[in-house]
Structures are given as structure tokens and as C-alpha cells.
Image: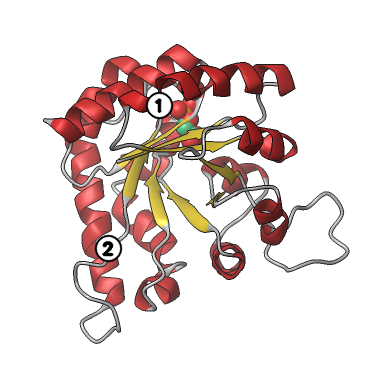
């Protein structure tokens, strides 16, 4: 199971060090969990240096071009240079605040794969879209942006994050989560198609994200087709993040 931390624009150098040191000490309790930490990019290098080798680190975004006159942007190769192995792409906050969608995100995923990064591609519907009954259509449209990679056997990790559950304390019900994760798996299967050059068992891991906390992690991570979690707020506190990893490990060993 994969438990990924999205620190967003939080913490400072001291806070990052404190959090990583605390996690390093507990890692031995999670032999079956892949921990991925996505700090702000300015702390990537020090996070990589401090984190135990089994922890992966990732960026929170990358640019779709290799290099050039893009002030303020960060390339996939730069993330790799700073020790990243993963990168979050298409997070709902990027979709909302930076207008990212469609072909732009396809370009970012392409650049990430080309740099050797594992993309964590985020999808999710807004509350209005769910209330209108459009959630499956929305997710299908977002997944279509990565069809080309699925068909080529390059599998991004997918994070299903209902927008209305992110940072709000509202969590989707386990049946809604299960339904959507099943739908995403079958949609990926459909996009890959019968004649693609990958086996039918080559499907992406799907993480759930949106107010995952120690007290709901057990229920969420036990849902079939939930392969892990992308954790925001609760990842800023070592005890909370560790408690989520503990729950994940318990499920793996049960
Ligand atoms: P949250 O954030 O856990 O604070 O809801 C999750 C995310 O945005 O990835």
C-alpha cells in the first residue's frame, strides 16, 4: 500500500526536519507500506537527504516543458536532480487556482515519465458535479487525459480526491469511495483496451485523498480497490501521519 503525504505550501525547514526525523524512527513498523513525502520543492533536497532511503520523495507539480524561459516554474528534471522519484500532477488546487486541465496535464505527465518520475495523477469531482450526478462523467473525462500512457503500459498512480472532501473534514462514504475506485479501475481497463500492449492485470494503483485522518483511515483503506491514501492536513503532524501508516500496515498484515 502507498501512503503519500502532500505538504502543500506548509512547514518550514525546521518543521520539515522534525517531521522527517519522527517518521524515520517509526519506519520499521511499516515494512509493507511505501511512504512518499511531497514537500514544497524548496525543501525537496533536504527532505531527501534526511529521510531514510526507503522513503520516497516527490514534487507537488512540474512544468510541461523541458526547460526554458518559464519564470517561477520547476521542471521534472529539476525534481529528479533534487532527489524526487514521484510528482503529483493535476491536484485539484492546481486545477482550481492555476486552471490546469486537459492537454496541459497530459504534457506534464509525459514530461514526468520522460524524466523518470512516477506521476501521481489526481482526479476528482466538485460538490456541484456530484449533486448533479455527473461525477462519473467528470472522472472519465479527467482519466481520458492519461489514456495514452495507460495504453503504452506507463501507469501513473491515480489519486481519487473528491474536491469537496479536501481539507474540509468531510469524507466520502466508504460506499461512494468503493464505487468510484471500482469505476476508475474499470475505466482504466476500458481505456487500455483489449488490443493494447499491456496485460489485463496492469492497472494503476488508486489512492484515496480527502480528509484522511487516523480515525477514518482504517475504514477507507479497507475498501476494495483502495491501494493507499494521499494525505494533506494529517500529513503535517508526525503522530497523525504515523497513525495512518500504522492502520495501513495492519490492513496489509491482516
Ligand atoms: P486533505 O488533503 O487530506 O487535507 O484533505 C488531501 C489532498 O489535497 O491531497
Q: Secondary structure at mark 1?
A: helix
Q: Nearer the viewer, mark 2 or mark 1?
A: 1
Give left or right: position of 229 versus 58: left
Q: Is residue 231 visible?
A: yes
Q: Camera-side residue: 65 or 176?
A: 65
Q: Camera-side residue: 185 or 156?
A: 156
Residue 78 in the image, given as x and y percentages of width and height = 73, 55
Say which residue appears at 32% left-offset and 49% top-offset.
206
Give left or right: position of 103 versus 246: right
Q: Quadrant of residue 14?
A: top right
**Quarter that holds the N terminus:** top left
**For residue 174, above or below residue 118:** above
**For residue 153, above or below residue 160:** below
Dot 2: few (<14), some (14–19), or many (≥20) neighbours within 10 Å?
many
Dot 1: few (<14), some (14–19), or many (≥20) neighbours within 10 Å?
some
For residue 193, the mark is: none
Q: Secondary structure at mark 2?
A: loop
Q: Residue furthest bottom?
A: 195
The residue that label 1 is drawn on is 27
Q: Is residue 169 visible?
A: no
**Quarter that holds the C terminus:** top left
The residue that label 2 is drawn on is 203
Q: Residue furthest left?
A: 254
Amino acid at each position: 500500500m502507498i501512503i503519500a503525504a502532500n505538504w502543500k505550501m506548509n512547514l518550514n525547514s525546521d518543521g520539515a526536519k522534525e517531521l522527517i526525523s519522527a517518521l524515520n524512527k517509526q519506519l520499521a513498523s511499516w515494512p509493507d507500506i511505501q511512504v512518499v513525502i511531497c514537500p514544497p520543492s524548496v525543501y525537496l533536497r533536504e527532505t531527501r537527504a534526511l529521510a531514510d532511503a526507503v522513503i520516497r520523495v516527490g514534487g507537488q507539480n512540474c512544468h510541461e516543458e523541458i526547460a526554458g524561459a518559464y519564470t517561477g516554474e520547476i521542471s521534472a528534471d529539476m525534481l529528479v536532480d533534487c532527489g524526487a522519484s514521484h510528482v503529483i500532477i493535476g491536484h485539484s488546487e492546481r486545477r482550481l487556482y492555476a486552471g490546469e486541465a486537459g492537454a496541459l496535464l497530459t504534457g506534464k505527465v509525459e514530461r514526468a515519465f520522460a524524466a523518470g518520475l512516477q506521476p501521481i495523477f489526481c482526479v476528482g469531482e466538485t460538490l456541484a458535479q456530484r449533486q448533479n450526478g455527473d461525477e462519473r462523467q467528470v472522472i472519465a473525462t479527467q482519466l481520458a487525459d492519461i489514456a495514452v500512457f495507460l495504453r503504452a503500459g506507463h501507469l501513473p498512480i491515480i489519486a481519487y480526491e473528491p474536491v469537496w472532501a479536501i481539507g474540509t473534514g468531510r469524507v466520502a462514504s466508504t460506499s461512494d469511495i468503493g464505487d468510484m475506485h471500482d469505476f476508475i479501475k474499470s475505466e482504466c481497463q476500458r481505456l487500455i483496451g483489449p488490443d493494447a500492449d499491456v496485460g489485463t492485470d496492469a492497472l494503476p494503483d488508486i489512492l484515496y485523498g480527502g480528509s484522511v485522518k487516523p480515525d477514518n483511515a482504517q475504514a477507507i483503506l479497507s475498501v476494495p480497490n483502495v491501494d493507499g491514501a494521499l494525505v494533506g492536513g494529517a500529513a503535517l503532524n508526525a503522530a497523525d501521519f504515523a497513525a495512518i501508516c500504522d492502520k495501513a500496515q495492519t490492513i496489509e498484515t491482516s
